[in-house]
Amino acid sequence: PTRRKPSRQQALRARRRAMDEQVRSLLTRGRDHYRAGEYDPAERLLNELAKTRQPFPDVYEMLGVIHHQRGEMEAAEMMFEEALRLNPTYTEAALHLAVTYNDQGKYDEAREVYERVLSGKGAGPKQLDKLVKGKIANMHADVGQAYQEVGDFAEAAEEYRKALRLAPGFLDIRAKLAMALRSCGHNAEAIVELEAIKKENPRFMAVRLNLGLAYFAEKRSADAEREWREVLAIEPGNRMAKMYMGLIPAKP
């Protein structure tokens, strides 16, 4: 019997199925290369997929990461922005965009993005998991470091506080907060932070050294001397502790 010629609708459906299979193949292979860290073949496949105009936000997010890893910040920024245009609640793309802004010195733009993520605007989850909170905390810390480097210690302290509200267990950020407070002349507040860190980790030598300096600035020479002597008991060759001990008046 003579086979009937497929209708136009059937032909269109067959063509769509073939295209869908091609897209799935490109996406699967591209993701596999990306996850293996094979960025060149991943980029070729993902770019080919992007040309199909399929609304896949994660394709643009992966391309953004590839560009970021190569130091191509403007291209990375464009990819993450496109991912967010397609899915405004895409948390990972937003975080990567904030990091990319931060790397380019666009601190206000970075802050706006990750504060939007933190506020949970849109349909995204309001309770961020520990991983995401940790990433945002580190972003706040990076902005705080930038403020600290230009001598704006008050703004630096505020950024470190924001970071610690998300990740109170990050002792390195708490130490940075204490340094910023001490640089502002808020020695009493710095001492509270440094004593809390010392309680958590008595072998955090930089904290003990700076606690001694904060005590000394508050005219608590005996407490300062105690801290520096304890540092030397743990690390007898610590040059900074030896130098600071020279601040203590010799006893008659």
Image (spheres, rainbow, N blue to C red):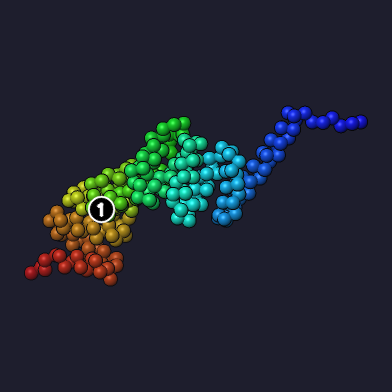
Q: Is residue 247 above or below residue 176?
A: below
Image location of residue 140, percent across then percent down: 34, 46
Q: Residue at x 71, y 36 (%)?
A: 15
- In the picture, residue 215 is in which quadrant? bottom left
- Closer to us: 55 or 165: 55
Q: Is residue 64 left or right of residue 173?
A: right
SS label for mark 1:
loop
Image location of residue 171, percent across then percent down: 33, 52
Q: Quadrant of the N terminus?
A: top right
Q: Residue at x 64, y 42 (%)?
A: 23
Q: Is residue 203 left or right of residue 79?
A: left
Q: Residue type at mark 1? A: Val
Image location of residue 65, percent across then percent down: 49, 50
Q: Which residue is mark 1?
A: 150
Query: Is residue 91 something that shows in the picture?
Result: yes
Task: Report the residue that reaches farthest toward the bottom.
Answer: 237
Q: Quadrant of the C terminus?
A: bottom left
| Label 1 Cα neighbours within 10 Å, binned few <14 / some 14-19 / many ≥20 | few
